Amino acid sequence: MCTGIFNSKSVFLGDNPFEYFVPLLLFDIAFLFLAANTTNYVLKRFSRYSRFVAELGVRSTTALDSNVEDKFSCWPPSTRHQAQNQIIARRELNAEIQLVTEEVEKTSSESKKFSDLHSELDGLRQEHQNLRSTFEYEKGLNIELVERMRGMETNLMSMAREVERLRTEVTAAEHRINAPNQYVGTYPQPAQAAVFS
C-alpha cells in the first residue's frame, strides 16, 4: 500500500508534510482560498476605482509575462510553445478588456447624456402642456368675447332699426304739420304768425 505518498507521519515526528501530495494539496487550496478572499476584499474596497484596478491588473500581467518568458527557456519546446500561446492569448484578452472598459465608460457617459436629454424632454413636455392650457383658456375667453360682441351687434342693429323707425315717424309728423289743411282755411304757420304780430 502507498500510504507514504499520501500521508505524512507528523511534523512532530520529524516528517516534512510538504513532501506528500495530500498535505501539499490542502495547503494549496487553503492558500488559494485566502488569496481569493483577500483579492475580493481589496477589489470591493476599490470598486470606485475600477479603471485603476483594471489597468493595475493589465500592467502587472504584462510585467509577469516578460518575466515568465525568461523562465520558459529551461522548459521543453512543446510546453514552452503552449505557455507562449497562453501568454499571447492573455495579452489579447487584456487588450480586449481595456477596449471593453473604454466602451463601458463611453456608454456610461452617453447614458448620462441620455438621462439629461430625457429630463429636458420632460421639461419641454410640461412647458407644452402649460402653453396648451393657457391657449385653451384664452380661446375660451375669446369665444366669450365674440359672443358678447355678437350680442352687442344685434342690440346695435335693433337700436338702429328703432332709430330709423323713429326718424320716419318724426319725418311723417313733420310732413303732417307742414301740410296745408284742405278742410279749414289756411292758418299761418307759427313762423308766419310771429312775422304778423
Image (cartoon, rainbow, N blue to C red):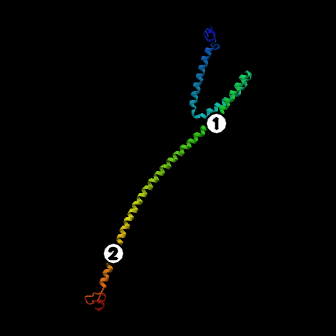
Note whether residue 14 is visible. no
Camera sees residue 25: yes
Answer few, some or many: residues within 10 Å of disc 2's Cα (few below 14, many 20 plus, some between 14 and 19): few
- Name the quadrant containing residue 12: top right
Secondary structure of the residue carrying numbered label 2: helix
The percent position of residue 3, horizontal first and vertical second, equals: 62, 9
Single out the residue that lies furthest toward the front: 182
- Name the amino acid, label 1: Leu
Residue 124 located left or right of residue 61: left
Give the answer, above or below, for where 92 lies relative to 154: above
Of pointers 1 and 2, the one earlier in the residue sequence: 1
Residue furthest out toward the bottom: 196
The residue that disc 2 covers is 165
In which quadrant will I find the N terminus? top right
Q: In this view, does 191 lie above or below 163?
A: below
Q: Give the numbered dot on residue 99.
A: 1
